[in-house]
Image (tube, rainbow, N blue to C red):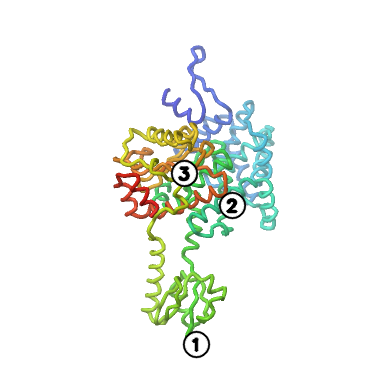
Amino acid sequence: MNSVGQQLETWNISLLNDRRAGYILQYEENDYRKAVSQFFLGTVQDQERERLLGQFFQGLDLAWLRRIIVRQEHEWHLHFSDQVFLEVLLVLALAIQRQDHPVTVRTEDARMLERYNDYLFAKAICQEAGQMFGVVFSEEEICFLTMRIMCAGFVRISQPDQIQETWDVIREYDSNLLAFVDEVLSSMAAILDCALDTDQNLRNSLILHLRSTVFRLRHGQRRSNELLQYIKTEYSRVYTASWIISMLFEKYFDLQITDDELGYIVLLIQSALERRNTEYNAVILADFARSFGELVSQRIIRYIPEIRRIDILSRYETDNPHYREADLIITRTSCNDPREVIIDNLLSEQGVAELKAQIRRKEKSAASQSPAFSVECASLFSPDLIFLQQKFSDKETLLKFATTWLEEKGYCSSGLYQSALNREKLTSTSIGGSVAFPHGDPEFVNESHVALMTLAEPMLWDGEEKVDVVFFAAFNMNSREERHRIETFYKELIPCMADGRFMKLLRSSRDSISLYKELFR
């Protein structure tokens, strides 16, 4: 019974031992229904599910409910996954079975939900099911079903000719989400040095994805991400940069985003980066006939698909817009431009191979610039907040140590420790490479600073990963200047973490003043 009680506590359900009545459950109705749904969705084996559903909803014709859902799917031109179909079935069955135990939905949530197609779909299903089973579904029940659908991750535009109208509605009633996405794209563009803020496809994808994310987090449905460890390892650059998103998320929604949810956002951003990173606009500086230049350009495009467009110009057309916007300048003699790639014979196989090789060398060179922090980030660090070769018994002791130092210097208030601890309970802040990046709520930060700690022995951070380098971030982004400085910090931290020499220097340092000087060489 203790084991059962611990499982139920996950859903805010208490198991009480009453001497007269025996064991009883104490709960809010919303939590109870979520627990039942999660039991059938995540705990019961497929081969046992039908039998247990029949027992739990004894006397309720589930086959008819299934037919109603299928009919509405066809009418609305939708196709649910098996999991979403089962979730809708469970919500409807529970609403019918527990008519005398109403759910509750916040008024402001209900007003917003009514603006989406998902609400209209949920209402249509409830009306048909109500007629079939003689039940009147309340507005709260319809909204509760809508929330479960939205938590499953699909808010859709109904008809192609209504796209603009639908987006206008979203802009009107979802301005907070739109502002959040725009700020995220602006920050990530600055940190990753890529024009993500002009990528409309990425913007739309984030809007649709994050709306479901907010509903899941607000209404207690956690989503696991089986790819998380792979994302941390393979896309460490974007994952590190994405931690600014968690602070912005709290600022806009007063919610803490989990690392599982953050991983899905990283995948969207990584996909956008890869779309950009594999394409180049090039210019050929021609000192030969134009017809020869056309032949060369066709050969290059055929054998090097990363080059999407080539313009043929003379070396005297440097004021041409195509020249200014080019990623590569292909030439037979130097034009004193850092973008230049000098190839003597572009028609030969050797010439094409050399062009490929030089493009790769340029990419590698850009990614391997000597890492260090700029003077702009200097005020975030100080020698008396660099603690080297430390030993801590556990993560909580480390966090208490860091926040106590920050508080003594007036950089934060006492609530920072608890907010950082709460975050760790919700999500791991290890970011791969044996590095952790814990941080607390910005509302407890008076002045932005970073406490840098290295450990004499790696510490088990989240039950799986060990870390030996910790950046404790106390950030407050109340002003534009402060936000820019923090974006610069993230941008410069990424190549530092990817540089083996730099990380070796961190781990081997014994003197905080000497290390501080190395950070800003």
Q: Give the secondary structure at mark 3.
A: helix
Residue placed at 60% from the left, 29% from the top?
Answer: 97
Q: Earlier in the sequence, mark 3 or mark 1?
A: 3
Please name whichever residue, 376 or 86, is drawn nearer the observer in this view of the structure.
376
Give the percent coordinates (x, y) of residue 363: 41, 65
Amino acid under disc 3: Asp
- Disc 2 packing (10 Å; few <14; some 14–19; many ≥20): some
Q: Disc 3 vs disc 2: which is toward the camera?
A: 2
Q: To which residue does mark 1 refer? A: 289
Q: CA distance from mark 3 to mark 2?
A: 22 Å
Give the percent coordinates (x, y) of residue 465: 35, 42
Amino acid under disc 1: Ala
Residue placed at 38% from the left, 51% from the top?
Answer: 519
Q: To which residue does mark 3 refer? A: 260
Give the percent coordinates (x, y) of residue 103: 62, 30
Please name whichever residue, 145 or 246, is drawn nearer the observer in this view of the structure.
246
Q: Are marks 3 and 1 in contact (CB under 8 Å)?
A: no
Q: Give the secondary structure at mark 1.
A: loop
Q: Are marks 2 and 1 in contact (CB under 8 Å)?
A: no
Observer able to see residue 14: yes
Q: To which residue does mark 2 refer? A: 182
Give the percent coordinates (x, y) of residue 373: 42, 53
- Is 34 left, or right, of 459 in this rendering? right
- The quadrant the N terminus occupies is top left
- Disc 3 packing (10 Å; few <14; some 14–19; many ≥20): some
Amino acid under disc 2: Asp
Q: Give the secondary structure at mark 2.
A: helix
Observer able to see residue 48: no
Residue 129 found in image quarter:
top right
- Is 17 left, or right, of 454 in this rendering? right
- Disc 1 packing (10 Å; few <14; some 14–19; many ≥20): few
